[in-house]
Image: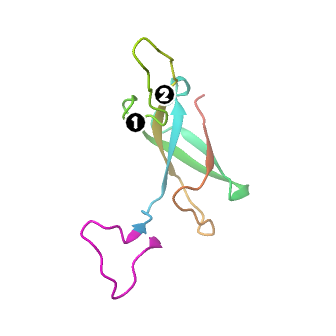
Amino acid sequence: RIAHLTAAKGQYVQPGQNISMFVPDPLWITANFKETQITDMRPGQEVDIEVDAYPDRKLRGHIDSIQPGSGPAFSILPPENATGNYVKVVQRVPVKIVFDDLPRDIVLGPGMSVVPTVRVR
């Protein structure tokens, strides 16, 4: 499905210019967990999902994959340490969560806020 269209019929565009944004099907969540939170997480574990836009609905999913690494290239807050200055920042690790059965009456789009809770026990 098309989520955002920035061009109109007859309009000139440049090579490489973005003219639309597509929402993939099926949808998934990329949750950035602290590296200290993923110790017991594994692909296949169940996830309870709360969507801010639908506060009265509880959705279900599971972990599809956990990114195999962390570091400045993947970090939300990359370290900017000067020589001799070191501050440890807990890194974030992207975890891909897929929905088990997304109801048709729930419409989700890129950038919407969710709160995933992984069942690790």
Magenta part of the chain: 1-20
Question: Magenta span has 18?
Answer: yes
Can you tell which quarter of the image residue 84 is in?
A: top left
Question: Is residue 45 among what the camera can see?
Answer: yes
Q: How many marks?
A: 2
Q: Residue furthest right?
A: 56
Dominant SS in magenta: loop
Q: Residue furthest bottom?
A: 10
Does residue 58 appear to the left or right of 4 in the view shown? right
Q: Which residue is mark 2?
A: 91
Q: Identify the secondary structure beneath mark 2.
A: loop
Can you tell which quarter of the image residue 66 is in?
A: top left
Q: Residue at x 56, y 41 (%)?
A: 46
Question: Magenta span has 3?
Answer: yes
Mark closest to the chain's N terminus, 1 or 2: 1
Task: Report the disc number at residue 3.
Answer: none
Residue 16 position, x and y percent, is 27, 65
Q: Amino acid at mark 2?
A: Gln
Residue 3 position, x and y percent, is 48, 69
Q: Which residue is mark 1?
A: 74
The front one of 76 and 51 is 76
Residue 34 position, x and y percent, is 54, 29
Structural crowding at the residue carrying mark 2, measured as other residues with C-alpha within 10 Å and reported as few (<14), some (14–19) or many (≥20): many
The front one of 84 and 107 is 84
